[in-house]
Every structure is written in structure tokens, then in C-alpha cells.
Image (cartoon, grey):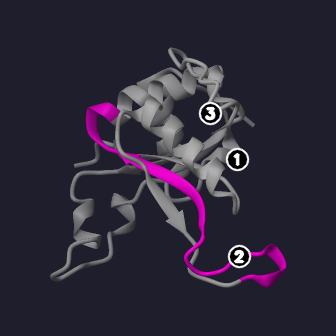
């Protein structure tokens, strides 16, 4: 029950308020992940930024299982197999950005999309973590079952051969 595994990998592209960029981002995420992305829609109004409710400001796709592991390995190679310690949080999750999708191995340039960057967020879990998410009798996980930053770093080093720098 102490084995760490990847719960999900989320790819996100923030496009701002232009719908054309959102469509390009959706096309890119679909090509990278072979899954259907969803649009992220604003809920709040921020007049200084020109944001109103119902406006599309980005797109994202969530992958789980074997597909997520394979894509994560490709994305880490795009980073040069190096992560900074600041990419990890205290709950054992980590995230990083990719400036140009062309850095990803096997990614082909699409003239319609142009050059876009994306952010990647990885959520780690242990077996039994469903206890905190279930609808009936949800419970807090004990501290010994939570994933620390050091355990997450060790998992990434062992599983993917990544170097973590200070």
C-alpha cells in the first residue's frame, strides 16, 4: 500500500481571451495526447483584464494509466531529463512547463498551430487514496499514507531516471 503511482497527467494551455488561440491549443493537445481536450471557461468577471463569465481562456486534457506514463516519459525527455526541486510541492505532486511543443520527441510541426508552449501537472497517489475522494464516508488520509516531497523526488528518479537540481 506504500507503492507510489501516477494518478493523472494534466496538460494545460492558457490562451487568453482570443478564441482562435484556444482552437489551436485544442488541436495541439489532441495531437499530443490522442484524447479529446476540453475548453476552460471563466467563471468570474475581471474588467481590467477584459474577462467575463463564459469566455474561453484555455484548454486542457487529463490522461490516466499507461497512456499517461508514456506521455510523461516523452515530456520529461523534452525537458532534458532535468527538473528543479521547486517543481515539487509538499503533497508529492509536481509540475513543469514546456516552452515549445517542438521540443517533445515525435511531435511534428503544424503550420496551423504555430509555436505554442504548455504546462504539465502530475498528480501522484498511493493505493487506498480513494478514501479521501469517495462520496460516502470520505476520510482524511493519515500522515504516513501521504506522499512527501522527498518520496515524490525518489519516485521520479527511480521510475524515469530524472536528475533533480536545487
In x, y percent, where is residue 81?
Answer: 60, 22
Q: Give the range drawn in magenta.
A: 46-67
Q: Where in the figure is residue 50, as x and y percent of width and height?
A: 77, 75
Looking at the image, residue 159 sits to the left or right of residue 149; the answer is left
Q: Residue 57 magenta-drawn?
A: yes
User: Mark 1 or mark 2, which has the lower sequence index?
Assistant: 2
Circle 2 — which element? loop
Q: Is residue 113 left or right of residue 123?
A: right
Q: Position of residue 69 (x, y in %)?
A: 37, 31
**Location of mark 2 (residue):** 51
- In depth, the one of 21 and 134 nearer the eye is 21
Q: Which residue lies furthest to the right in this view?
A: 48
Q: Can residue 70 be seen in this view?
A: yes
Q: Could you tell me which secondary element the residue under label 1 belongs to?
A: helix
Marked residue nearer the N-terminal end (2 or 3): 2
Categorize mark 2 by other alpha carbons within 10 Å: few (<14), some (14-19), many (20+): some
Q: Mark 1 points at which residue?
A: 86
**Going from the N terminus, do you reach mark 3 or mark 1 first?**
1
- Numbered badge on residue 113: 3
Amino acid at each position: 500500500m506504500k507503492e507510489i503511482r501516477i494518478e493523472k497527467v494534466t496538460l494545460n494551455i492558457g490562451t487568453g481571451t482570443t478564441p482562435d488561440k484556444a482552437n489551436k491549443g485544442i488541436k495541439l493537445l489532441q495531437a499530443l495526447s490522442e484524447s479529446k481536450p476540453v475548453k476552460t471557461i471563466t467563471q468570474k468577471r475581471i474588467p481590467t483584464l477584459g474577462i467575463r463569465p463564459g469566455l474561453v481562456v484555455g484548454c486542457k486534457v487529463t490522461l490516466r494509466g499507461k497512456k499517461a506514463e508514456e506521455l510523461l516519459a516523452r515530456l520529461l525527455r523534452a525537458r532534458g531529463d532535468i527538473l528543479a526541486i521547486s517543481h515539487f510541492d509538499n503533497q508529492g505532486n509536481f509540475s513543469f512547463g514546456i516552452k515549445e511543443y517542438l521540443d517533445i520527441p515525435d511531435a511534428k510541426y503544424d503550420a496551423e498551430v504555430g509555436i505554442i508552449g504548455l504546462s504539465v501537472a502530475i498528480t501522484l497517489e498511493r493505493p487506498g487514496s480513494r478514501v479521501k475522494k469517495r462520496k460516502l464516508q470520505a476520510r482524511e488520509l493519515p500522515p504516513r499514507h501521504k506522499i512527501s516531497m522527498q518520496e515524490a523526488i525518489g519516485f521520479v528518479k527511480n521510475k524515469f531516471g530524472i536528475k533533480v537540481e536545487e
